[in-house]
Amino acid sequence: MNTPPEVGPDVVSRIWPEFKRFSQVKQRLQPKSYSAFENELNHVKGVKS
């Protein structure tokens, strides 16, 4: 069974420099940067079924 590639904190930090780490429960990230994040996700290849 293949697992999908992960989007690590390095990818999120490129889009939102104020991002600290995933273990923080709540973080306020600027919504205007979401489209740039979506664009990064387009470069992540999923698992073929």
Image (cartoon, rainbow, N blue to C red):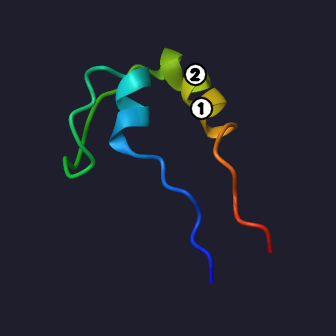
Residue 5 marker: none
Q: What residue type is labelled 1?
A: Glu
* Front residue (pair 39, 34): 39
Q: Residue 46 at what x, y percent from top left?
A: 69, 57
Local crowd at mark 1 within 10 Å, few (<14), some, or many (≥20)?
A: some
Q: From what the image shows, is residue 46 above or below residue 3?
A: above
Question: What is the quadrant of the N terminus in the image?
Answer: bottom right
The residue that label 1 is drawn on is 40
* In the image: residue 31, left or right of residue 20: right
Label 1 with label 2: CB-CB less than 8 Å: yes
Q: From what the image shows, is residue 46 above or below residue 24?
A: below
For residue 20, what is the image quadrant? top left
For residue 34, what is the image quadrant? top right
Q: Residue furthest toward the top?
A: 32
Q: Which amino acid does label 2 sit on?
A: Ala
Q: Residue furthest toward the right?
A: 49
* In the image: residue 26, left or right of residue 3: left
Residue 36 marker: 2
Q: What element carries label 1?
A: helix
Give me the C-alpha separation between circle 1 and circle 2: 6 Å
Q: Residue 12 at what x, y percent from top left?
A: 40, 33
* Front residue (pair 39, 29): 39
The residue at 40%/23% (across/down) is 14
Question: What is the quadrant of the C terminus in the image?
Answer: bottom right
Q: What element carries label 2?
A: helix
Exactly how many numbered labels are in the figure? 2
* Front residue (pair 42, 32): 42
The residue at 30%/20% (across/down) is 17
Q: Residue 42 at what x, y percent from top left?
A: 70, 37
Q: Residue 44 at what x, y percent from top left?
A: 64, 45
